[in-house]
Amino acid sequence: MRKILFSIGLIIAAFSFLASPLRASEGTAELKSIKGETMRCFATSILMENYEYQVSLSCRDLIYPPKPDAFSYILWATPTQNDKPLNIGELGIGKGNFKTKTAFSKLFVTIESDIRTRAPEGEVVMEGAIQGISFLDQAEETSKPASEKVTPTPTSTPTPTTSSARNILGKILGTGAIILGLVLVVVIVVYFLSRRRFR
């Protein structure tokens, strides 16, 4: 029994190990300046059918040229299996569309003089970790859409109309007639009882 449970645990661990790099690499990243500057980039990473990650970036407030002797912003990825950075490509005018088959968990940008460099040699100016797409990770809700909210109107004391006044008057007259009838019955009974006594 223990061997069976151990084997099941190994299988689950292997699947989770294989799946985690894929899930870690698909998502979005906000690359922010590590020096408090306004430059920033937003990145998306989507795993395509050919098992390549489609990485797209849009940046703001980049300075050109970045340095007098270095003219290029280079995008790097930190792979999930090792710490050796991977050159994804040059940002160009602050927008880019790149492809890589390597699973990664982090993106960062350096200023380089050689865009073909295989290791980051320049200054790191921005970085950001890949965040999962929570909207896609959540189970699809099957509940019905919420109906439109009805704004309650404040209740006010209704103004009596002619028909309601007639109803009230009718009730008063009816009650008065019943009371008058009871009084008449009591008077007649008392009258007859008093006559019998005098006889």
Image (cartoon, rainbow, N blue to C red):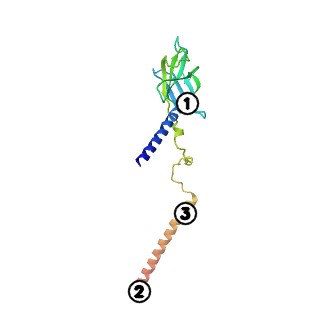
Q: Is residue 61 visible?
A: no
Percent across and percent down for residue 129 are 48, 29
Between the C-alphas of marks 2 and 1, the distance is: 111 Å
| Mark 3 vs mark 2, CA separation in Å | 44 Å
Where disc 2 sits, the SS reads helix
**What residue does disc 1 label?**
44
Which residue is farthest left?
A: 197
As drawn, which residue projects farthest toward the right? 49
Question: How far apart are labels 1 and 3 at the CA level?
Answer: 73 Å
Kind of residue indicated by mark 3: Asn
Q: Amino acid at mark 2?
A: Arg
Circle nearer the viewer, 3 or 2: 3
Q: Which residue is under mark 2?
A: 196
- Residue 98: image quadrant is top right
Nearer the observer: mark 2 or 1; the answer is: 1
In the figure, residue 97 lies in which quadrant?
Answer: top right
**Which residue lies most toward the top here?**
68
Q: Give percent across and percent down for residue 79.
A: 50, 28
How crowded pointer 2 is (Cα within 10 Å; few <14, some 14-19, many 20+) is rated as few
Q: Nearer the viewer, residue 179 or 47?
A: 47
Q: Quadrant of residue 88?
A: top right
Q: Is residue 128 visible?
A: yes
Q: Residue at coordinates 53% horizontally, 44% vertically from top-left?
A: 139
Q: Is residue 73 above or below residue 160?
A: above
**Quarter that holds the C terminus:** bottom left
* Mark 3 or mark 2, earlier in chain: 3
Under tag 3, what secondary structure? Answer: helix
Residue at image mark 3: 167
